[in-house]
Image (cartoon, helix red, strand yellow):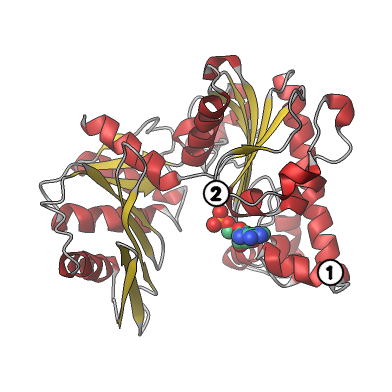
Amino acid sequence: MSVLVINSGSSSVKFQLVDPSDGRSIASGLVERIGESSGHVALTYEGETTENSAPFPDHGAGLRSAFEMMKERGIDLSDAGVTAVGHRVVHGGEVFSEPTLIDDDVCRKIDQLSSLAPLHNPPNLQGIEVARRELPDIPQVAVFDTAFFHALPAAAATYAIDSDVAAAHGVRRYGFHGTSHEYVSGRVAEFLDRDPTSLNQIVLHLGNGASASAVRGGAAVDTSMGLTPLEGLVMGTRSGDIDPGVIMHLRRSADMSVDEIDELLNRRSGIKGLSGVNDFRELRTKIESGDDAARLAYDVYIHRLRKYLGAYMIALGRVDVITFTAGVGENDLNVRADTLAGLEMYGIVVDPERNAVRSKDARAISPDGSPVTVLVVPTNEELAIARAAARLVG
Ligand code: AMP
């Protein structure tokens, strides 16, 4: 039994054939540069990678090429025991609070939510439409990035603006990376062999995009991303929190258009905007060579993270576990150590030796018996989507 997981972005599609029972990745691949003059598709199966370059005018052409490649490698999706196709969908708005079996009506609703996520929902939907056409007999399931935060308490979900305007335009805090926060907080309970309802957790998903969540008894009570994935922590290329007055100022004084400001805050800000690079490995190299801009970028990043950590410690009242996940959280020991430095009086301690261990497994980096357990737990959004899809189709 396997689930084909599809994560369809603006110019790329990631796909993975996953066994939801044990999490084994049977095959995985990536179609890139869709819509450009030369596209690229790669498939890894049984330890061997096959690649092909060709123009893919749209998502349909890209995915068809990937399916063709799977066939050539002996993976026939219709015979491979594929029980479902699971699609990552970024914005579920107020409509979708859980994984949903896809039909025409669901596609229409995902399309209607595109105004809230213009860069994400349309390519997600294209992936869904192609997969439905190519694999018409396999049930398709949408798994929403916002779903885990659907029931945020009103005080955490509400922006303090005119409530009529907010209601008319769907302006509220939705939160993103929900599949990861849900998966990781669930893995934490498993790893600690604790009932999830007994745990108060802070999850720090630090990848190229970054978000924090406060999870009480298995339910999210706050998260750092809002109407869009732009709010909150400093990210690879996104600003995170910013005075909304900056936007009006740039509009009026710098004569920047809304699209230009959008591009500035989403793609030319964050670590990249401050230092010129967005990868933490390159940032570290620059810091070590004495680059002041890189140092400042790092300090701003850590400062913002600690602000959220403090806020969520107070929101939860009692914190049992703090968990780092995603590319930076799983790999960058300096970020982990600096985020939690000097918090011994709150029972938060990082053991330097444990923190220095490199591993793909979940692990504790706090000393045994610490009041607050600090963990590193690799996220696996594909597995979470595969499991959600498999559960839904039974
Ligand atoms: P993600 O979005 O979760 O795939 O995370 C990607 C980011 O993780 C990259 O942009 C890097 O900043 C960071 N990253 C990946 N590997 C490492 C590493 N070994 N050390 C530090 N940062 C890393």
Q: Quadrant of residue 46?
A: bottom left
* Residue picked out by circle 1: 288
- Return the x and y of residue 160 as percentages of the image width and height: 67, 32
Quick one: 123 or 186, which is closer to the camera? 186
Q: Mark 1, mark 2: which one is toward the viewer?
A: 2
Q: Quadrant of ligand 1?
A: bottom right
Q: Residue at x 47, y 47 (%)?
A: 116
Does 100 sit above or below residue 113?
A: above
Image disc number at residue 360 = 2
Q: Which is more toward the observer, 188 or 382?
A: 188
Whole-percent x, y for residue 268 in the image: 66, 67
Q: Residue at x 29, y 37 (%)?
A: 389
Viewer can see residue 236: no
In the rendered image, the vertical position of residue 287 relative to residue 325, given as above or below: below
Vertical placement of residue 123 versus 211, above or below: below
The image quadrant of residue 371 is top right
Q: Position of residue 13 (x, y in %)?
A: 36, 62
